[in-house]
């Protein structure tokens, strides 16, 4: 799958900024468009408060409303989905995004930030939410390693063949 032949969308939800950092690195290497998933109601900044709220929302199946939606989803072939792992899965705003988006026939490439759980069962959950999509191997980056993950992101994308061709001068 050559990058020049595919339309890419890099989608991410970031609470602390770590996932945004990885999303920006992916965008730098793979190109395409970027879309940030932003819930209407912000999550608390306090770590313990956000952890408790996320647990309640995940246990109840709550899907928070989002501020914006992707326009013209049909034009994308590959959708990178980025998120922090909360309670071993995707956070509720990402569940909302995946539930409300028609990703049929799309290639989904997950990436996450975490503090020791790696993907947990989030990739399985994405596959369940998007049964008519192809889900590729993802990239999990420990939050404390985000600032030095440039080479890891590059190597991962090269392994997927998601790099822009060299431009001739």
Image (tube, rainbow, N blue to C red):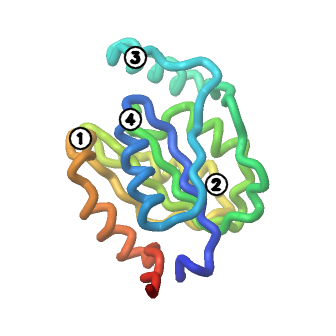
Disc 4 from disc 2: Cα separation? 26 Å
Disc number lying in front (4 or 2): 4
Residue 109 in percent (x, y) is at 50, 61
Q: Contact (CB < 8 A) between labels 3 and 4? A: no
Q: Is residue 132 left or right of residue 26?
A: right
Q: Residues within 10 Å of mark 2 (few under 14, many from 20)?
A: many
Secondary structure category for the residue under label 2: loop
Disc 1 from disc 2: Cα separation? 26 Å
Disc number lying in front (2 or 3): 3
Q: Residues within 10 Å of mark 1 (few under 14, many from 20)?
A: few
Secondary structure category for the residue under label 3: loop
Disc number lying in front (1 or 3): 3
Residue matched to label 4 = 17
Disc 2 from disc 3: Cα separation? 30 Å
Residue matched to label 2 = 130
Disc number lying in front (4 or 1): 4
Disc 4 from disc 1: Cα separation? 17 Å
């Amino acid at each position: 799958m050559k990058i020049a032949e595919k339309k890419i969308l890099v989608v991410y939800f970031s609470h602390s900024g770590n996932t945004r950092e990885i999303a920006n690195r992916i965008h730098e290497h793979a190109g395409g468009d970027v879309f940030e998933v932003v819930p209407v109601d912000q999550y608390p900044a306090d770590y313990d408060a956000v952890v408790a709220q996320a647990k309640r929302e995940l246990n109840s199946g709550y899907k928070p409303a989002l501020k914006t939606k992707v326009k013209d989803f049909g034009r994308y072939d590959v959708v990178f989905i980025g998120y922090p792992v909360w309670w071993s899965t995707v956070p509720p705003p990402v569940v909302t995004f995946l539930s409300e988006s028609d990703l049929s026939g799309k290639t989904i490439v997950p990436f996450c930030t975490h503090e020791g759980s790696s993907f947990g069962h989030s990739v399985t959950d994405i596959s369940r939410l998007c049964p008519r999509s192809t889900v590729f191997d993802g990239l999990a980056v420990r939050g404390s390693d985000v600032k030095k993950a440039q080479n890891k992101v590059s190597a991962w994308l090269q392994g997927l063949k998601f790099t822009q061709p060299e431009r001739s001068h």
